[in-house]
Amino acid sequence: MKKTKIKSRISWAIAIILAVAGLIIAIVPFIFMILNSFKDKFEMLTNGIFALPEEWSLANYKTVLEANFPRYFLNSVVVLVISLTILLFIAACASYPLSRMKFKGNGFIYSVIVACMAIPVHITLIPIFRMSQAMHVYDTIWALIGPYVAIGVPISVFILTSFMKSIPKEIEEAAEIDGCSRFKMFFKIMLPMAKPGLSTLAIYNGVTMWNEYIFAYTLTQSADSRTLPLAVWDFRGQYSMDIPMIMAVLTLTALPMIILFIFAQDKLIKGMTAGAVKG
């Protein structure tokens, strides 16, 4: 009994140490980024990278906001909202029949969708680039929506199908007895009950789309069409030696996702755990 208690305490101690180490590794870059974003160009070099600013100046943020940053931000928001809406709708429409209906080819279709997760997305850059030119959407934000949706579909269908399978079938059977059609069952019952899973997918795919760089760099060229990751690149080129300015850009870029996670973390955790146990 004593040996069991000792092992349990050792396990907890190791877990706590690893958790604290993980927290430090995760939070130190943010501290570095935020502290140095308030410094001037040479203060970071003279006083040290983790020293508090001598004067908490907003000059870097003012310069960034007066440049093309608001345009980049708006482009990212538009692309994110439209892409996420289309992606979640497609994933829900595909996951419902794959998880609740028995038909010939169900397993094969699901296997093909899951197998698409193994395809390296960057090998599609050239075909998508040529396609965007042929469709006359190159160098517009609309060129990004299709690829973002297509990239997110396999993992979204995989997760949401598993989640919908965990919803008790008795609920559907009761609704069917009451005369509920398949369409009403999907929109009135399944979608509301799948909100935790959809929230998880929205956060997961939203962060990926928000930070995506390669497709944005390949499919857009002008400042009017670029998104936030390219804004970071532009400011790095313009202020190659002004590290505090770059830190201000990075802080403003990361801030929306940090705020989103703070307010939606409970939904993310529920979505990740809800499908783990069959109802």
Image: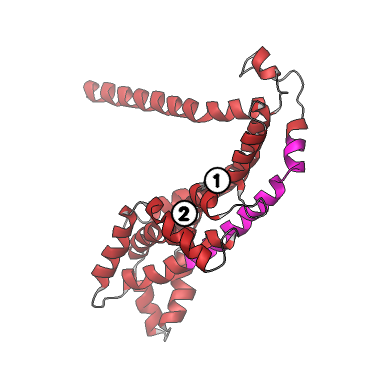
Q: Position of residue 230 (x, y in %)?
A: 59, 45
- Residue at figure coordinates x 40%, y 56% from the top left: 124
Local SS, label 1: helix
Local SS, label 2: helix
- Magenta stretch, residue numbers: 61-89
Residue 195 appears in view: no
Task: Return the residue found at the far top.
Answer: 46
Q: Are marks 2 and 1 in contact (CB under 8 Å)?
A: no
The N terminus lies in quadrant: top left
Which residue occupies the foreground of this view, 205 or 249?
A: 249
Disc on the earlier residue, 2 or 1:
2
- Residue at figure coordinates x 56%, y 61% from the top left: 138
Residue 151's tag is: none
User: Residue tagged by mark 2?
Assistant: 200
Residue 22 appears in view: yes
Q: Position of residue 18 (x, y in %)?
A: 39, 26
Rendering quarter of residue 254: top right
Mark pair 2, 1: CA separation: 11 Å
Which residue occupies the foreground of this view, 204 or 196?
A: 204
Tell me: residue 103, above or below residue 157: below
The C terminus lies in quadrant: bottom left
User: Residue tagged by mark 1?
Assistant: 261
- Residue at figure coordinates x 32%, y 63% from the top left: 113
